[in-house]
Amino acid sequence: MRDDIRDWRHVFKLDPDKTISDEHLELLCNSGTDAIMVGGSSGVTFDNTIDLLSRVRRYAVPCVSEISNLEAVVPGFDLYFIPVVMNSRQGQWITGRHREALKQFGKMLPWESLVPEGYVVLNPDSTVAKLTHADANLGRHDVVACANLTEKLFRLPVCYLEYSGTFGDMDLVRQVRDNLEETQLFYGGGINSADKARQALAAADTIIVGNIIYEDIEQALSTLVHR
Ligand code: 1GP
């Protein structure tokens, strides 16, 4: 399964702290998206995560977890994405919480199912930027340097440019991707139409669609432009 992510172009990200109807969930899971990612910045618990996982499991689509807190580690996902926030000012978001997880879960961890992501948080007003104390007002050279940290120094398989809540600078996203050799570039933030999905797909390897799912399901489904 870890190798499959190379082929992913489109992912829907579901927030366990938000409500989604069975009907909308079915539309998303049968949409042709490459995966459903479950995760969020606040209010994510064991109970609401396992509830969403079991609902998504009615469908054939891969279902992966993006872990943001230790209480929400639930067994049974296909993969576990582990954010390492490259532009956090606090060590807990880079290695601190990760060390705690290794201490708590130790030998139980399914190493082959873990996918570390070098997160670069770029919308200073987003919940994730505030939560992780990210230095989100970065210039172009700093963003490229964060991507280089991810690929060249830490050798992580995924770099995630996270503009959560706002549509980012696609020229910069493209520049980052062109600079990467092995590491796969995820882009997320403000994709709420087919046009923006096209722009983001032209700039990144994989696009992540979040908020619009809860605002306008038809618009969310319209982001599947790559097929
Ligand atoms: C959030 O990158 C994802 O983690 C998607 O962003 O919610 O703005 O679509 P949006």
Image (cartoon, helix red, strand yellow):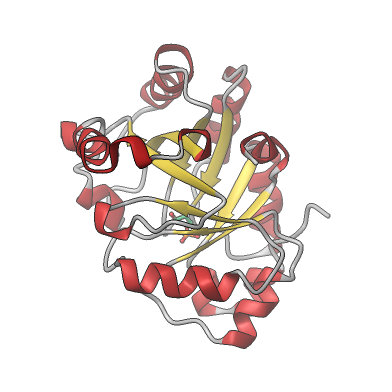
| The C terminus, quarter of image | bottom right
Residue 9 appears in the figure: yes
- Of residues 176 and 107, the one nearer the viewer is 107
- Residue 2, quarter of the rendered image: top right
Residue at left 49%, top 36%? 115
| The N terminus, quarter of image | top right
- Residue 43, quarter of the rendered image: bottom left
Residue at left 54%, top 86%? 21
Q: Residue furthest front?
A: 107
> Residue 8's x, y, as percent?
69, 44
> Residue 106's x, y, as percent?
29, 36
- Of residues 183 and 29, the one nearer the viewer is 29
Q: Residue furthest top?
A: 152
- Residue 90, quarter of the rendered image: top left
Q: How many marks?
A: 0
Position of residue 96 in the picture relative to residue 118 (left or right): left
> Residue 152's x, y, as percent?
46, 12
Residue 125 appears in the figure: no
> Residue 118's x, y, as percent?
41, 31
Position of residue 104 in the picture relative to residue 195 (left or right): left
Q: Residue furthest right?
A: 227
Is 210 rendered above or below residue 106? below
Residue at left 45%, top 24%? 147
Residue at left 18%, top 36%? 92
- Of residues 75 and 149, the one nearer the viewer is 75
